[in-house]
Image (cartoon, rainbow, N blue to C red):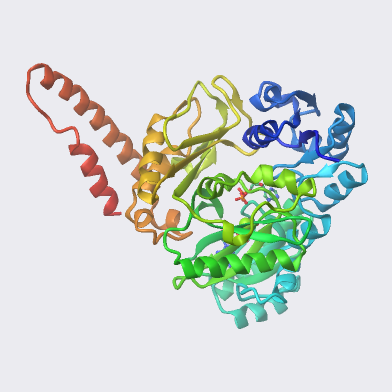
C-alpha cells in the first residue's frame, strides 16, 4: 500500500526538510515535539503534531514506544527518522516494521552491520574496498593493543566501534601515551555508547574527508550520486561541505563511486546512505564507515544532481524501483553548505545557546536555507546546537563560493554566537580556494584572532562607507574596495 501519512521522528531543520518533500508528493505529515520544542516551526509545519514528553531526548525523541504510539494515534503508516536520534538504531527499525509501520530507511540488518565500525570493516573487506590500515577486531587488553600499535606504527587512532558524531576517538602520537589514551578511550566509549569496544587504526596525518552518496532500491539496484568533500571539521565533525570535491579527477570520482557501491552491495543496502572515506595526499582513499541514513549535508548532492533524496527515500520504502541508472546521473555545477551552529568559534566552538534576538535569512539566486528556527525562539541546550544549513549553488565552484560569501553577509543573527564568521574565514582562505585543504585546516590555520581581524576589517569597511558618503557629498572619491582587497591579501598570507 502506498505511503499516505509520514511521521517524522525528529526535530528542527531535518524534520521540516522531510515534510517538504512529503507534502510535494501529496503525503500527509505528523510532527513530534518535546516540551522544549512546542514553538518550533517543525511542529506547526506538519499537518498534525504530537507532544512526546519532556525536553531531554532520552525522555522524548529517543523513546521508541512514544514514537510508535504517536503513529498509532495519528494513523501514520510510515516513519522517517531523519539523522541522529533513532535513525541508526536497528532495534527501533525492527520494532517499527513489527508494528506494521513502514520504516523509511535501510533494513535492520544493514543498519546493524554498518552501525558498528568493526563489523562494517569485516563486511566490506570481502568486496575489495580499501581500508584504513588497522585492526578489524575489537581489543581490550592494553598490552596486546600496544603490540598491535607498534605493528601499525604511530600515530595511531583509537576508535570506539559504536562511535559517531565525531565522538569516541583518540589520537596517540607516541608509545608512552598509549596506555593512558586507551583507558580513556574505553571509558569514554562505555559512557557515550554503552559499549567499551575499541579498535586501532593508523592515524592518517593530513587527510581529506570524501564521502559518497548512495541510493539503493528493494529490487537490488544500487547507484552512487557522486562525492561530497567535508574536510573542514572541528572536533572531527563537519562544518563546511561541498559537492563535488575540488580536486578529484573524473577517473578517481568513478573509482570512489564504485567502491561506495560495493560497500552498499556488501550489506544488500536499500535506501539512502553515505559511504565515508579518507583520502591521502595522492587522493588514494580508504573506507572509514557507512552512515545508514540521510546525512546532514545531503542538500549539496541534491543541488548538483537534481535528485530530491528524501523523495527517493520515500519511493524506495514504497517498493518502487529507482527511476534512474548510474549512466543517467551527472554532475552539474557546484554546491557548498555551511553549518550554522550556535557556537562561539572564538571560544573553542563551545555551544552558545540562547534566544535568537535577530534572525533574518539570506535570499536570492543560488541560495537555499534549511533551518528549524524563527526570530525570538530559543536555541535549547538539550539538543544539537545547529540552527541552520546555508547552502549555495553556482555554475562552477567560484560562483558557489561567491554566492556563499554574499549570503553569509546577508544572514543576520544576534542573541547567540554562530559559526558564520568562521565559515566566512574558511571561504576566503587560499587553501580552501585552491582545494588543497585537509581535515587539519582548523588546527593549522584557525585562531580566534583571525575573526577579530575580520571584525575590525568590517568595521573599517563601515568606516570607509561613512567616509565615502561624506566624500561623495563633497564630490570627492574614495576607493570602497581598498579594505576588502587588503582582507583578501591578509587572508591569503595565512
Ligand atoms: P553527518 O554524519 O550527517 O555528516 P554528523 O556527524 O554531524 O553529520 O552527525 C549527524 C547527527 O547525528 C548529529 O546530530 C550527531 O550528533 C548525531 N550522531 C551521529 N551518530 C551518532 C552517534 N553514534 N551517537 C550520537 N549521536 C550521533
Ligand atoms: P564518526 O562516526 O564520528 O563520524 P568517522 O570514522 O567517520 O567517525 O571519523 C570522523 C572524522 O575523524 C573523519 O572525518 C576524519 O576527519 C577523522 N578520522 C577518522 N579516522 C581517521 C584516521 N584513521 N586518520 C585520520 N583521521 C581520521
Ligand atoms: Mg563519520
Q: So how many labels did they put on this image? A: 0
Residue at 11% across, 21% down: 471
Q: Residue at x 12, y 20 (%)?
A: 472
Which residue corresponds to the image point at 78% horizontal and 38% vertical from the top-left? 58
User: Residue 165, can we see it?
Assistant: yes
Outermost residue toward the top in this view: 473
Quadrant where the C terminus lies?
A: bottom left
Task: Name the one closer to the observer, 354 or 390.
Answer: 390
- In the picture shown, does residue 128 fall above or below 44? below
* Quadrant location, ligand no. 3: bottom right
On the question of residue 275 being in view, the answer is no
Q: Judge whether 38 appears above or below 151 on screen.
A: above
Of the pair 324 and 30, the residue shown nearer to us: 324
Give the percent coordinates (x, y) of residue 38. Answer: 71, 22
Task: Identify the image quadrant of residue 18.
Answer: top right
> Which one is in front, 217 or 30?
217
What x and y, as percent, mark residue 86? 77, 45
Side (left or right) of 64 relative to 408: right
User: Residue 153, how many percent across, how many down?
Assistant: 57, 79
Say if 478 sits above or below 375 in the image: below
Q: Is residue 173 above or below residue 300?
A: below
Residue 351 in picture, x, y percent from top left? 56, 38
Q: Quadrant of residue 30?
A: top right
Amino acid at each position: 500500500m502506498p505511503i499516505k501519512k509520514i511521521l517524522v521522528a525528529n526535530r528542527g531543520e531535518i524534520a521540516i526538510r522531510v515534510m517538504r518533500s512529503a507534502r510535494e508528493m501529496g503525503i500527509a505529515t505528523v510532527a513530534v515535539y518535546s516540551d522544549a520544542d512546542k514553538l518550533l516551526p517543525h511542529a506547526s509545519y506538519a499537518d498534525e503534531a504530537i507532544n512526546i514528553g519532556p525536553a531531554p531526548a532520552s525522555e522524548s525523541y529517543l523513546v521508541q514506544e512514544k514514537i510508535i504510539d504517536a503513529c498509532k494515534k495519528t494513523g501514520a503508516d510510515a516513519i522517517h527518522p531523519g539523522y541522529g536520534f533513532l535513525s541508526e538504531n536497528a532495534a527501533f527499525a525492527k520494532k517499527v516494521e513489527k508494528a506494521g509501520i513502514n520504516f523509511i530507511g535501510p533494513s535492520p540488518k544493514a543498519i546493524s552491520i554498518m552501525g558498528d565500525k568493526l563489523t562494517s570493516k569485516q563486511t566490506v573487506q570481502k568486496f575489495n574496498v580499501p581500508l584504513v590500515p588497522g585492526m578489524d577486531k575489537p581489543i581490550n587488553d592494553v598490552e596486546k593493543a600496544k603490540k598491535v600499535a607498534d605493528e601499525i606504527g604511530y600515530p595511531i587512532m583509537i576508535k570506539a566501534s559504536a562511535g559517531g558524531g565525531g565522538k569516541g576517538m583518540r589520537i596517540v602520537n607516541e608509545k608512552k601515551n598509549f596506555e593512558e589514551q586507551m583507558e580513556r578511550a574505553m571509558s569514554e566509549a562505555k559512557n557515550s555508547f554503552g559499549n567499551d569496544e575499541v579498535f586501532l587504526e593508523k592515524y592518517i596525518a593530513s587527510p581529506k574527508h570524501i564521502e559518497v552518496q548512495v541510493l539503493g532500491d528493494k529490487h537490488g539496484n544500487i547507484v552512487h550520486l557522486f562525492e561530497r568533500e567535508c574536510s573542514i571539521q572541528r572536533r572531527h565533525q563537519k562544518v563546511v561541505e561541498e559537492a563535488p570535491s575540488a580536486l578529484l579527477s573524473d577517473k578517481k570520482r568513478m573509482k570512489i563511486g564504485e567502491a561506495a557501491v560495493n560497500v552498499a552491495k556488501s550489506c544488500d543496502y536499500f535506501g539512502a546512505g553515505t559511504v565515508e572515506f579518507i583520502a591521502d595526499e595522492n587522493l588514494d582513499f580508504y573506507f572509514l564507515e557507512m552512515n545508514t541514513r540521510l546525512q546532514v549535508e545531503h542538500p549539496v548532492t541534491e543541488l548538483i544532481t537534481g535528485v530530491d533524496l528524501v523523495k527517493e527515500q520515500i519511493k524506495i520504502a514504497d517498493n518502487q524501483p529507482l527511476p534512474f541508472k548510474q549512466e543517467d546521473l551527472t554532475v552539474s555545477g557546484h554546491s557548498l553548505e555551511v553549518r550554522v551552529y550556535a557556537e562561539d568559534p572564538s571560544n573553542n566552538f563551545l555551544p552558545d545557546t540562547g534566544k535568537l534576538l535577530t534572525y533574518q535569512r539570506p535570499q536570492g539566486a543560488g541560495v537555499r536555507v534549511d533551518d528549524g528556527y524563527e526570530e525570538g525562539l530559543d536555541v535549547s541546550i538539550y539538543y544539537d546546537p545547529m540552527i541552520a544549513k546555508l547552502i549555495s549553488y553556482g555554475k562552477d565552484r567560484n560562483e558557489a563560493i561567491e554566492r556563499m560569501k554574499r549570503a553569509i553577509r546577508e544572514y543576520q543573527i544576534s542573541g547567540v554566537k554562530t559559526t558564520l564568521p568562521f565559515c566566512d574565514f574558511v571561504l576566503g582562505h587560499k587553501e580552501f580556494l585552491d582545494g588543497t585543504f585537509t581535515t587539519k585546516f582548523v588546527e593549522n590555520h584557525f585562531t580566534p584572532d583571525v575573526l577579530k581581524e575580520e571584525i575590525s576589517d568590517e568595521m573599517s569597511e563601515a568606516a570607509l562607507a561613512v567616509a565615502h558618503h561624506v566624500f561623495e557629498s563633497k564630490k570627492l572619491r574614495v576607493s570602497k574596495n581598498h579594505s576588502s582587497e587588503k582582507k583578501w591579501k591578509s587572508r591569503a598570507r595565512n
